Image (tube, coloured by chain):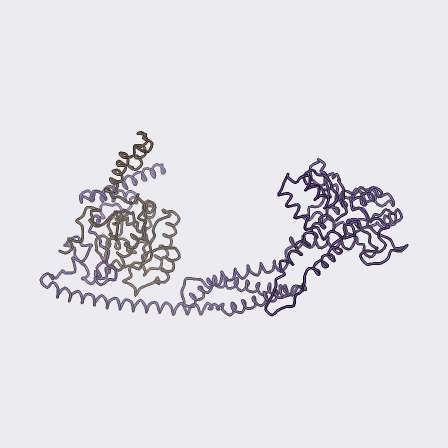
Chain colours: A brown, B purple
Amino acid sequence: MATAARTSTGGGGAVPSAGKIFQFKLVLLGEAAVGKSSLVLRFVKGHFHDYQESTIGAAFLTQTVCLDETTVKFEIWDTAGQERYHSLAPMYYRGAQAAIIVYDITNHESFNKAKAWVRELQRQANPNIVISLAGNKADLANKRMVEYEEAQSYAEEQGLLFMETSAKTAMNVNDIFLAIAKKLPKTDPAGSRNPGQTVNVNTAAQNVEAKSSCCGGSTGATPANAAPTRT
Amino acid sequence: MAQPSRRTSTTPMTSRGFSSAEVVVREGFICPICMQDLGSIDDLQDHFESDHAEEDRTLLQQLKGLVLKRIGRAESPVPFRSSQAVSSDDEGAANSFIVWDDQTLGARESHTDYFKKIRDSRLERIMVETNKLIIRLDKLAHEAPSDPKQRAAFEKHLASWAPDHDVPICPNCGKTFRRFMRKHHCRLCGCIVCSDCSRFLSEDFAERLTNPTGNRLAPEKAEPSGSPARSVPGSISSGSGIRARSNSNESIMSIVSSLSSKDKEQTIRTCEICQNLLERRLKQTEDRYVRVQLEDLHERLALCINDSESLYPGYLEMTQSLQMGESNYQLPQAAEIRTRLMRLLDEVGALSKQIAALPPTGNPREDKLRSNIRSSAVDFLKSRISAIPALPSAEELAKLQQKRREEVKQRIAAQRASEEKRKRDSTLNRLSYLASKEPAHSTPKKEQPKNPFDDGGGNPFEEDASEDELNPFNEPDGTSPPPRQSNSGWAPEPLKQTDFDEDDDPLLQQITRVKITLEQAKDAGRVDEAASLSRHLTELEDFYKQKVIQQL
């Protein structure tokens, strides 16, 4: 099949043409039954189930997206929307670099809840978190209760990425993850986990060690200098 | 000028807020190097050139320049006469200097430099003279002894009074002094004038001149000795420096004293010329510090205009948005900004009117400036007031918003229709493309390999393939090349609800869930996922322990 040439066979990060691999933690938040799990399952597995079980706690999934130069691996935490699991949410969004707040366009209350989530993230989460707003169930536009413009202007006001999505038709599902992947900062070395690069740094340091007898000649100083690069 | 004023006065500075050390102020033609008083400019110059020629060339140069400027002007026969005498000299010099040639067509000559030269030197001289007057005024006001006789001597000495017999006519008005016409000495320059030409400087005036920064005297000076002592005629024992119109004549003294029931009105007699010089100086200093009302008003006007200009674009956007029926802005919010804007514009109108209505100065340029300010403000108001759009009323807004919603719905429907059409077209295109290119490879599942999320077969599609065509990564005719997505997505198996107790602590449920997921990740050989999960499991367990401890 033609697929074989384009996709790698498992084993995270072994994509030949992509340079660096960045790993980001992404959390899905939103009211119950807005389609968070469907959205993420569509993204990760390409599936859609009409009857999706309600999530317990938080589900963990991963998916990798290739950009032009880099590869982004998302560690996705799909949290439960039910109120009783609300206390778990901070554990997930606190260390997250990205968040998707999902609401249901046929349910205005879920949009209000999404706004509350945005406020909570702005107050409690990592200040550099990339927040995006997804108006899910866009396929049910005939039952629409939240206008596109309303959400759009709200998102602009708050500086959020915004898309109306449909897990059922896959509309904008990959796009929203891709947009997040593009927006996430790629300079943070903590996010990079390319083992090859780490080795390169070390060998470079060793090279310097071998050559740098001219600067001072103190043998004690060079390992001390090299030590931080190794970490 | 030629008359040397030779004086060294010791000033008790304590009362003026300086150190208690006595400061000697010397006045006259004093050599800057040996501090000898030479008595005249020429003597000083000669002395300096002969005695200190080699000492300081630069100083010499400076001094020479200074002295040269003086020469030719200070030769008035009247000792230390004021600008009047001097200026007549200057005019004479100017007349003799400028020779008007017959003007030939197109030829012109600039006299600006010459004018400046004359003007600068005159300004400088006036300044020096006025400074001298002020120094004397300061001494008169603050250092004169209180005893009338001593004071008279002090005054005579300070300004070196002209001898009475030298002056047969009043130099100011030209009247001949007769028997009953008194000669009055100006206390500042020492010249003699008739009573009509003499003036009195008030204490306040002297104070403003000698103390322009406005710090009043130290308390012990500011409070003249108690008024009871003052009321006794003839025994003026004022602690205050300024005496009532004192004169050497005792009779006048007593008259003055008796008159001085309101003797706070203390004055210094001067001549008209000195007074003019001093008044000019006072006006200059005050002009420098006093803010003109026009400036003040204009500043406020500019502020209002700026404020309204910064408000205006935002308001315009708001009204436009509201007129479109959007819900981005609230009506009351917009109304408030409109009120603020209107208030600012009112203020602009009021301020410009106030500027135009300021009392005329007599200066045509300032009057013109004012009318220009007013007319530009009026222009601004005209352009702005007509450009401020009205806000829709609440009902209108509701209608507009309703209309907008309908439009949006229509647009969405149209969009969806066109999307579906495009989808169908692209499917058709692809089918025909595949049919033409690879007829042998076309299988009933031909769409499936295009799906990047496909695990590699066995993935049942609930919907038909057209659903996946919406997937932007699969758009073959997309404008940008679709980003490649590896097949490394991983998700655990669906949970069995039986693993969980509904009433369990959510945290315990989550721990169970993560444990199950971790096992699955390990089984699937997902090293990274397993690592992340086990890290997270530790976090969760720590969190749970803390929670339990807190509950205990």
- Image quarter where the C terminus of chain B lies is top left
Q: Is residue A57 visible?
A: no
Considering depth in this image, is B312 or B246 the residue closer to the camera? B246
Q: Is residue B462 left or right of residue B67?
A: left
Count of numbered circles in the view: 0
* Residue A110 in which image quadrant: bottom left
Q: Is residue B460 left or right of residue B511?
A: left
From the top left corner, tell me how far across and down residue B487 is, in percent: 19, 51
In the rendered structure, the answer to whether residue B440 lies left or right of residue B100 reads: left
For this orientation, the residue located farthest to the right is B179
Identify the residue shown where x is 66% and y is 45%. B63
Task: Say whether residue A142 is left or right of residue B55.
Answer: left
Q: Position of residue B77 (x, y in %)?
A: 78, 52
* Residue B352 visible, this angle: yes
Q: Position of residue A43 (x, y in %)?
A: 24, 54
Q: Position of residue B320 (x, y in %)?
A: 43, 66
Foreground: B9 or B458? Answer: B9
